[in-house]
Image (cartoon, rainbow, N blue to C red):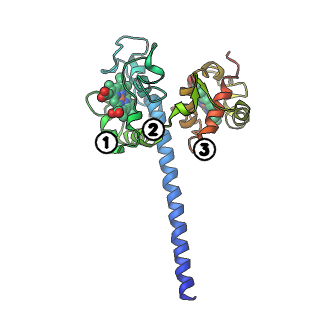
Amino acid sequence: MHRTHRKLLITITAGMFGLISGFAAAAETESAIARGGRLYDKFFKENNTAKPDADHPSYPNKGGKYGKDASWRCKECHGWDYKGKDGAYASGGHATGIKGINGAAGKDPAAIAAIFRDAKHGYSEKQLSAQDAQDLALFVSKGQIDMSKYVADKKAKGNPAKGEVYFNTICAGCHGKDGKKIKDAPPLGSVADNPYEMLHKVLNGQPGESMPALRALDPQIAVDIVSYLSQLPKQ
Ligand code: HEC
Ligand code: HEC
């Protein structure tokens, strides 16, 4: 083979290899981020560990409606919109006065993982393994979206007609076209009024279930689906 051709071939091969391993790395990161998102939602359901039975030490509303195991969920203190006291949990039953995790976006995942073991958080290795902490930290660092871009007046800014097509092809197999097929879950139409929670779950999946995470797709697809959910029957 001509020398320059061989050089070109080597360059192309190396380039392709770089591209493929780049995609493989991205694929691995993306699924770890989604798992981190499910841990953020309800870690003990996702990693199948013991459900906490007393209020989290840093939970301010001791003995309240969202105490005990609920008070250990990251989302309970930091919100479905990741903005804590500056977001949807500014007031109402879930208000804690605690700041969001949005300020930690882009930070070093190792530094974030250390936070889960600090005195304020106190998650043990039994509750969150090193792998769990790593996935969660990746989610906090790289997985947050700015939901205020996609939600206005507590409604998802999507196209419900497109959302219906996505829902009927991606979701209905498990949930039914009416969102009522899973008997131990509430009808999806009845939980659709929290667009932040819906967006988080559609992007990352449901803790401990085989529900898909759509975060590798354009976020607008999730937003369109969430817009459609509110048209499903509420009971
Ligand atoms: C019971 C309430 C509570 C729970 C549950 C909780 N946190 Fe926190 N979190 C806090 C408090 C309080 C702070 C400190 C805020 C401050 O320093 O003013 C904090 C701070 C943070 C920070 C740093 C934010 C910043 O900008 O500095 C991150 C990241 C974080 N938490 C992630 C998590 C994750 C992930 C989980 C779930 C594994 C979690 N937290 C569960 C109360 C909680
Ligand atoms: C492989 C089956 C499967 C697919 C596909 C699936 N889900 Fe789920 N989903 C589940 C299961 C199982 C649960 C947990 C039900 C329960 O709480 O017992 C769930 C829970 C949910 C919840 C939480 C309901 C609650 O408890 O508040 C929402 C919202 C949801 N799914 C929306 C969707 C949407 C939107 C899609 C399509 C993008 C989808 N799901 C696709 C299986 C699936």
Separation of disc 1 and disc 3 at Cα?
A: 28 Å
Residue type at mark 1? Ala
Residue topped by disc 1:
111
User: Which numbered disc covers residue 200?
Assistant: none
Residue topped by disc 2:
36
Q: Is residue 55 visible?
A: yes
Task: Say if disc 1 is inside 8 Å of ligand 1.
Answer: no
The reply to whether callout 2 and callout 1 are in contact (CB within 8 Å) is no
Query: In the rendered image of this protein, does residue 167 appear above or below residue 231?
Result: below
On screen, residue 31 versus residue 235, left or right, reads: left
Instruction: Name the residue located 72 percent from the left edge and 32 percent from the top edge.
Output: 164
Separation of disc 2 and disc 3 at Cα?
A: 17 Å
For the N terminus, give its image quadrant: bottom right
On screen, residue 231 versus residue 52, left or right, reads: right
Label 1: how many residues lie within 10 Å, few (<14), some (14-19) or many (20+)? few
On screen, residue 94 versus residue 180, left or right, reads: left
Eye-nearest disc, 2 or 3:
3
Label 3: how many residues lie within 10 Å, few (<14), some (14-19) or many (20+)? few
Ligand 1 rendered quadrant: top left
Residue type at mark 3? Leu
Task: Say if disc 3 is inside 8 Å of ligand 2.
Answer: no
Separation of disc 2 and disc 1 at Cα?
A: 15 Å
| Residue that extends furthest to the bottom in the rendered view of this protein | 2
The reply to whether callout 2 and callout 3 are in contact (CB within 8 Å) is no
Q: How many marks?
A: 3
Percent of width and height locating residue 64: 39, 11
**Which element is circle 2 on?**
helix
Percent of width and height locating residue 204: 53, 36
Which mark is first along the chain, 1 or 2? 2
Residue topped by disc 3:
217
Which mark is first along the chain, 3 or 1? 1
Label 2: how many residues lie within 10 Å, few (<14), some (14-19) or many (20+)? many
